[in-house]
Amino acid sequence: MNNTNITLLPRFQEIEREAALWAVRLDREDVPADLFLEFEQWRNQSAQHREAAERFKDFWAGTADLDLFNDLAGTNAASHEGSRRWRRFAPAMIAASFAACGAFVYMALFAGAGFEQAYRTAVGEQQTIDLPDGSRIILNTNSALEAEFTAKARIIRLTEGEAYFEVAKNPTKPFSVETEKGTVTAVGTAFSVRVSSAEMNVLVSEGRVALSSEPLYAGASRILSAQNQKQPHSDIVEVDAGQAAVYDRQVREIKDVAEKEIEHQLDWQDGLLAFHGEPLSEVVAAISHYTDATIEIADPSLAEHRVVAYYQVGKIEPMLEALKLSANVKVERIDGRHVRLTQED
Amino acid sequence: MSQVFKAFLKHKPVIRRIVGKYRSNPSDIEELVQETFLRAYAAELKAEIRQPEKFLYRIAKNLSISRAIRKENSTTQFVGELSEMEVFADDGQVSQEDHLDARQRLAVFAEALESLSPELRETLIMRRIEGLTVPKIAMRLDLSVSAIEKRLAKAIVDCYAYIRGKGLDPADFGAKKIIRMKVASRRVATKSDKK
């Protein structure tokens, strides 16, 4: 080991400790804008800071896996040792262990058991849905979906808005997301779907999905058998991890998306809206999804103003407050439903 | 230190023998031994276990029996779904591997937890297993929010160091890698299928 390494080490450890502290501090529901700005300043000191921040954010998020002990404690083998303390947790644990049942247990115990449920979020609201097969959905603002599980298929109908899906693998039960514009089918993967009156946008962060104009669930095996013959079904288009597709009964566009960009686009799942230098017009368009109020940029020169900021999703007032701070913008409230942004003088 | 963890380290051969009555495949046995520990450890996080070794033995036995039953059931299921199973055979194998990986990760996390000082362990358990928020923990322990945040940060720095010290890559325990690994193993399976 050379001298440089030895002298750098204490500073390196300090950065790691600070990065760990930031990971913990930022993991809360209502992160104030000024705390984020402080973090951004800390992070932007050097590439080393940025790298450590990323690493410890990820590691801290990984420790959420410890939650699995709750499921394990709820399993039969352990439950004989009942106690007051245990009983307090029991209902939650039973629910959790149900959700954690792997594909194999699920098949053996619940084959044929149906499940049907509808979900809706209001403007500015987000909801995390844990499905009985272990899959997870994060429903974004102003969105609606229905989940229906049958003996053969897992079907989600996204009727409005946007949702992110983490699909638990189940080889015998394909997972389909149906929208007015087309269907996305997966076996076990992670992707997000947004549907509007114009089109369906699909972003695949892990694995691979199949797009089709008609639902596939009756014969999802078509996807793979078609692939094995190396002549894909005419109507089925595959989208891989790292790709985004625009679809409306047929493919309009498929493009590769850089990993950073994917993370950025999926920031909303963490309840965050993150901007890395987008023009104010885009920022306002994004914020508008989360509020009933109309936000108007009164000053045309402001529209091109670049913004670097994190906003907490759903709370419009702190967002506007943060905008004021980070973009040097004057916020005027005309009435409850109308906000005007002008250049700060 | 956890009584279950201590008892497990001491009586591992006995547990292995109990499981061995029901299983002959060494990797099956190791998996069940690990699962026995994880379940006992999980139970101890919720309640005091008075006779940890007896508790471990009982879990080992119950688990071996219930797994044997499950194996029978799922075999029956496979026959019925065979046509579809063929198409997705690779995915089925991978999902079992993923399950194993997840268990191994959890076992290492348990060891890492045991390597922490009592107050760091207590705080991390409150946050990650009991699911309490930082302000709630602060209230319960009668400490400031910033003191709890510092404890949690120290706890993950120490867990990180423990994992690195074991010669493992801490990134494999991060949230992103967990998903990425599943995808990678699935890709390998698909590729070998095409050959």
Image (tube, coloured by chain):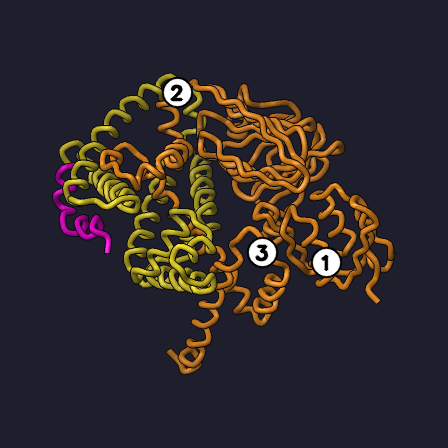
Classified by dominant secondary structure, the portion drawn in magenta counts as: helix
Mark 1 Cα shell of 10 Å, populated few (<14), some (14-19), many (≥20): many
Q: Which mark is residue B82?
A: 2
Res B118 seen here = yes
| B176 on left or right of A266 | left
Total number of numbered discs in the rendering: 3
Mark 3 Cα shell of 10 Å, populated few (<14), some (14-19), many (≥20): some
| Amino acid residing under circle 1 | Leu
* Mark 3, residue position: A31
Please, is residue A208 above or below residue A228 in the view?
below
* Mark 1, residue position: A323
Dot 2 falls on a residue whose secondary structure is helix
In the image, A13 versus A4, the foreground residue is A13
Using the rendered image, report if marks 2 and 1 lie on a common chain: no
Q: Position of residue B123 (x, y in %)?
A: 37, 56
Mark 1 and mark 3 lie on one chain; the one further toward the N terminus is 3
